[in-house]
Image (cartoon, rainbow, N blue to C red):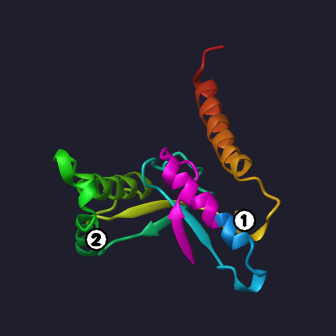
């Protein structure tokens, strides 16, 4: 499995890394390619993805490891920024809104976009692939509003 940034990330460098990675994997022999590739949320959350398309990674119990890994990236902590705390907060929010309310320990969930179709099929356009997901989100929002619109 390969984990990278998602293609809807707002940082050019993150999108550049992921597109280069997809292109490199596409050149590999099919039997050498990873079985799965996931684009994980970083600078843009993926809570908008349709639940059928959203990959949810359960990170319960990973708090200490995550915190220590995030603190290793000094550039993410300087100048009063606390990206480490913000990222853990996003994971908590994902879990809270993804799972039905149940008593028990606090949960952590990371959302990802399954990019496997892009590495298995060289003919799929990366931008169109993501745009399709955005269009489905847009259609869902329109449909939900129109259901309650008076006319």
Nearest to viewer (mark 1 / mark 2): 2
Kindly identify the residue that appears in the image at 43 percent across and 54 percent down. Answer: 42
Q: Is residue 78 left or right of residue 55?
A: left
Which residue is nearer to you in this view: 34 or 13? Answer: 13
Is label 1 in contact with label 2 (beta carbons under 8 Å)? no
Q: Residues within 10 Å of mark 1 (few under 14, many from 20)?
A: some
For mark 1, what is the residue?
Answer: 117
Q: Is residue 125 left or right of residue 133?
A: right
Quadrant including the N terminus: bottom right
Which image quadrant is residue 94 in? bottom left
Q: CA distance from mark 1 to mark 2?
A: 30 Å
Which residue is nearer to you in this view: 36 or 149? Answer: 36
Kindly identify the residue that appears in the image at 25 percent across and 68 percent down. Answer: 72
Q: Position of residue 53 (x, y in %)?
A: 62, 57
For mark 2, what is the residue?
Answer: 69
The stretch in magenta equals 1-21
Give the mark, 1 or 2, whose residue is nearer the N terminus: 2
Q: Position of residue 45 (x, y in %)?
A: 45, 49
Q: Position of residue 48 (x, y in %)?
A: 53, 45
Extreme residue in the right direction:
123
Q: Residues within 10 Å of mark 2 (few under 14, many from 20)?
A: few
Which residue is nearer to you in this view: 47 or 29? Answer: 29
Extreme residue in the bottom direction:
31
Quadrant including the C terminus: top right
Classify 89 as above or below 135.
Answer: below
Q: Position of residue 13 (x, y in %)?
A: 50, 52
């Amino acid at each position: 499995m390969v984990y990278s940034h998602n293609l809807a990330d707002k940082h050019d460098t993150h999108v550049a890394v992921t597109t280069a990675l997809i292109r490199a994997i596409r050149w590999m022999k099919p039997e050498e390619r990873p079985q799965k590739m996931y684009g994980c949320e970083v600078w843009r959350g993926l809570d908008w993805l349709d639940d059928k398309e959203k990959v949810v990674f359960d990170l319960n119990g990973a708090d200490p490891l995550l915190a220590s890994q995030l603190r290793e990236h000094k550039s993410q902590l300087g100048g009063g920024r606390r990206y480490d705390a913000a990222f853990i907060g996003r994971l908590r929010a994902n879990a809270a809104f993804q799972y039905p309310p149940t008593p028990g320990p606090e949960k952590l969930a990371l959302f990802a976009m399954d990019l496997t179709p892009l590495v298995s099929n060289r003919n799929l356009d990366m931008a169109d692939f993501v745009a399709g997901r955005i269009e489905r989100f847009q259609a869902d929002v329109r449909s939900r509003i129109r259901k309650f619109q008076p006319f």
